[in-house]
Amino acid sequence: MVQFAAAVAIACNLYWVSGSGFTLRQLLVALAVGFGATLYASYAMEQHRLERARAETVLEETRARQHRAELAHAARLSTLGEMAAGLAHELNQPLAAIVSYATGCLVRIEAGTTDIDTLGRIVSEISDEAIRAGEVLRRVKEFARSGEIRRERINPNTLVRDASLLAKGDARRMGVGVTLDLGNRMPTVDVDRIQIEQVIVNLLLNAFEAMGQTQRGERRVVVTTALVEVRTIEVAIGDSGEGLPPAMATKIFDPFFTTKEDGLGLGLAISRRIVEAHGGRLWATPNNGRGTTFRFTLPVGAREVWDAA
């Protein structure tokens, strides 16, 4: 239709300009120009369609990435809610120590039985405990932050240590012994630190809860890091609980599937999405004896940096 309209328009122009009828040659020229106009119009329309489709794809990816970030942030806040008792215990210890040291210092001053050196040591202890409480609050604030993915090069052993410190209060409250068996000379990984810590904390809390029916003296969690391939590191978190039925080994990663009475069923699903977004994978395997081990992998960066930490 575009070609026909262009040919008719050109033929009419020739007729009006020349003032006489147009020849077959002029008609062929009009058809050729109309065909060229058709090709150009088709090309322009196709380019416009491709650019629009590309823009819509980028917009959809941006929305999906933002949605995943918001969902992960909500899961972190939910995790902090579950850890509230443990975090309160972690803060209560240094605060109680500060009160104790300050009271002892005041008693000695009023009794006149102290000296400068003793006061110096007591004030130093108070300062150390205050720093310890501030560090707990810093970890909580950093863990709860929202925002876009911010990748950085970091040793996986550092990630495991920091996440274990966040879950330390819950481990103590639930009578769980946590052992870190970290590999030597681990390569750094290029990850969003907070999101990977979120995965580790979530797996640790799940391991603690999985041992609810286990006697307190037998509740053990072992966290290991290892280089399993040239460019892949693996983090494994194993517990000594009752273990998972084989039928649940894959279902537990489905959204909204949960074995907890008050659970949302999003923790493991979000954890798997986070790991996959970093180029790794997350899965669960039964232990030889009792319990379950959750493992996830992360690829080593393109320019791996080796660290003895």
Image: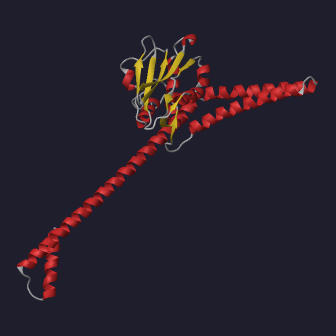
* Residue 164 vertical position relative to residue 28 in the rendered view, above or below: above
Quarter the C terminus occupies: top right
Quarter the N terminus occupies: bottom left
Residue 42 can be seen in this image: yes
Question: Which one is in front, 241 or 265?
Answer: 241
Residue 72 is situated, as x and y percent measured from the top left of the image, at: 48, 38
Relative placement, left or right, of 193 versus 18 is right
On the image, which quarter does residue 177 sit in?
top right
Residue 210 is situated, as x and y percent measured from the top left of the image, at: 49, 19
Q: How is the image coloured?
A: secondary structure
* Residue 148 vertical position relative to residue 222 in the rendered view, above or below: below
On the image, which quarter does residue 93 sit in?
top right
Relative placement, left or right, of 40 versus 214 is left
Please name the residue shown 5% across and 78% down the image. 24
Relative placement, left or right, of 253 versus 222 is left
Tally the numbered discs. 0
Please name the residue shown 35% across and 20% down the image. 247
* Residue 178 vertical position relative to residue 61 in the rendered view, above or below: above
Q: Residue furthest left?
A: 24
Relative placement, left or right, of 80 versus 291 is right
Residue 258 can be seen in this image: no
Please name the residue shown 38% across and 49% down the image. 60
Question: Which one is in front, 164 or 154?
Answer: 154
Residue 116 is situated, as x and y percent measured from the top left of the image, at: 88, 28
On the image, which quarter does residue 35 sit in?
bottom left
* Residue 41 vertical position relative to residue 257 in the rendered view, above or below: below
Question: Which one is in front, 117 or 65?
Answer: 117
Residue 117 is situated, as x and y percent measured from the top left of the image, at: 86, 26
Q: Residue furthest right?
A: 112
